[in-house]
């Protein structure tokens, strides 16, 4: 436990020194506040770009507050997830390929402690970025479009965060046995395949973590839509198995190839 | 130009600038980056959000 805490502090120090703790929250806030702004000022933006047929702009209606908030959170599943996968990819892979994993693990630090500490550091960055980003988006939506309940916003953001954390944990698992870029690529690809499978066969995949973004949207659109237990239970299980898998792989192979 | 709500647009511009400045500080302190430094400086300044993300994820060697 103590070694996890020490390694976690070292990870956070690294996050500060590499500016990760600053630039990722700033990117998340920017992504979050851009969505309400573009939704509200769409006619002006299109008008300034020119080439708009006359009469088209009169028909534009600003989407409802809940819809814009869902779109703002949706930004995090594209650029947000890309950023998260790219910062996760190096976490274990970098230590293995540089040889520092072998050096660190001769000390009384188990592979599990190392993986858990790295995962907790990633979780800290994600919570900070998503919390600030979602609050920024919510503030802009309320200023420009209309009221939203903070309860709905926080549960929607929490469910979205759980989904992003599943993707981060999967990338961490891949990072334990692949090169960094391959890990990021596979992590993003599996997250995309997972959501595609869920949208094609919702009946089969409704209990998986891939249902979480839909559940998050329902929290805003239906104002406290029914929470289903399936995704809420399977997501933590999925995350725990990714961490355990990464620790097992790291125990077996601390150096590449 | 006078009906632009600067109270709402201001933070957007400010954060964009902050991000570019963080990127440039990190670039100036980095010992080595992938590719020439002056090229990354141009990417950060001109590419604002995407440019800085690209620098931090692809340009820095420690991510």
Image (cartoon, grey):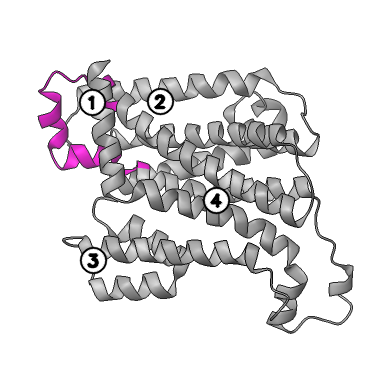
Q: Nearer the viewer, residue A198 or A49?
A: A49
| SS type, badge 4 | helix
Quadrant for the N terminus of chain A, please.
Answer: top left
Residue on which disc 4 sits: A78
Q: Is residue A164 above or below residue A181?
A: above
Chain letter for mark 4: A
| SS type, badge 1 | helix
Q: Residue at x 34, y 62 (%)?
A: B23
**Span highlighted in magenta in the image:** A88-115
Q: Which-is-in-front pick, marks 2 and 1? A: 1
Q: Which-is-in-front pick, marks 1 and 4? A: 1
- Discs 2, 3 touching: Cβ within 8 Å: no
Chain letter for mark 1: A
Asked if both marks, 4 and 3, belong to the same chain, the answer given is no
- Describe residue A170's horizontal placement relative to residue A250 as left or right: right
Question: Residue A232: x, y in percent?
Answer: 61, 22
> What secondary structure predominates along the stretch shown in magenta?
helix
Q: Residue at x 64, y 69 (%)?
A: B6
Q: Which-is-in-front pick, marks 4 and 3? A: 3
Question: Residue A125: x, y in percent?
Answer: 41, 39
The quarter of the picture where residue A228 lies is top right
The quarter of the picture where residue B25 lies is bottom left
Question: Residue A72: x, y in percent?
Answer: 64, 50
**Crowdedness near tag 2: few (<14), some (14–19) or many (≥20) residues, C-alpha within 10 Å:** many
Residue A242's disc number: 2
Task: Work out how far the residue at label 2 is from the one at label 1, CA to CA, in angstroms.
Answer: 22 Å
Q: Is residue A79 above or below residue A255?
A: below
Residue on which disc 3 sits: B28
Asked if both marks, 2 and 4, belong to the same chain, the answer given is yes
Chain letter for mark 2: A
């Amino acid at each position: 436990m103590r070694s996890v805490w020490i390694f976690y502090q070292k990870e956070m120090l690294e996050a500060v020194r590499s500016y990760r703790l600053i630039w990722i929250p700033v990117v998340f806030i920017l992504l979050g506040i851009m969505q309400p702004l573009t939704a509200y000022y769409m006619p002006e933006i299109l008008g300034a770009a020119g080439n708009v047929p006359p009469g088209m702009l009169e028909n534009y209606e600003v989407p409802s507050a809940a819809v814009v908030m869902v779109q703002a959170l949706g930004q995090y599943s594209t650029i947000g997830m890309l950023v998260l996968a790219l910062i996760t990819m190096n976490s274990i892979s970098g230590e293995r390929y540089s040889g520092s994993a072998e050096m660190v693990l001769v000390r009384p630090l188990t592979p599990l402690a190392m993986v858990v500490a790295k995962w907790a550091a990633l979780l800290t960055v994600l919570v900070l970025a998503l919390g600030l980003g979602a609050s920024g988006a919510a503030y802009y939506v309320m200023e420009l479009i209309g009221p939203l309940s903070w309860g709905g916003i926080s549960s929607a953001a929490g469910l979205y965060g759980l989904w992003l954390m599943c993707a981060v944990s999967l990338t961490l698992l891949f990072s334990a046995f692949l090169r960094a870029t391959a890990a990021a690529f596979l992590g993003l690809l599996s997250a995309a395949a997972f959501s595609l499978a869920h949208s094609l066969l919702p009946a089969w995949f409704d209990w998986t973590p891939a249902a979480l973004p839909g559940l998050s949207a329902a929290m805003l659109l239906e104002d406290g839509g029914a929470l289903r237990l399936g995704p809420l239970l399977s997501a933590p299980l999925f995350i725990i198995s990714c961490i355990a898998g990464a620790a097992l792989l790291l125990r077996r192979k601390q150096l590449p190839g | 130009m006078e009906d632009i709500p600067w109270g709402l647009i201001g933070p957007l511009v400010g954060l964009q600038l902050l991000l570019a400045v963080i990127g440039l500080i990190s670039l100036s302190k980095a010992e080595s980056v992938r590719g020439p430094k002056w090229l990354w400086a141009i990417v950060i300044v001109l590419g604002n959000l995407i440019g800085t993300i690209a620098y931090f994820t692809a340009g820095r060697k420690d991510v």
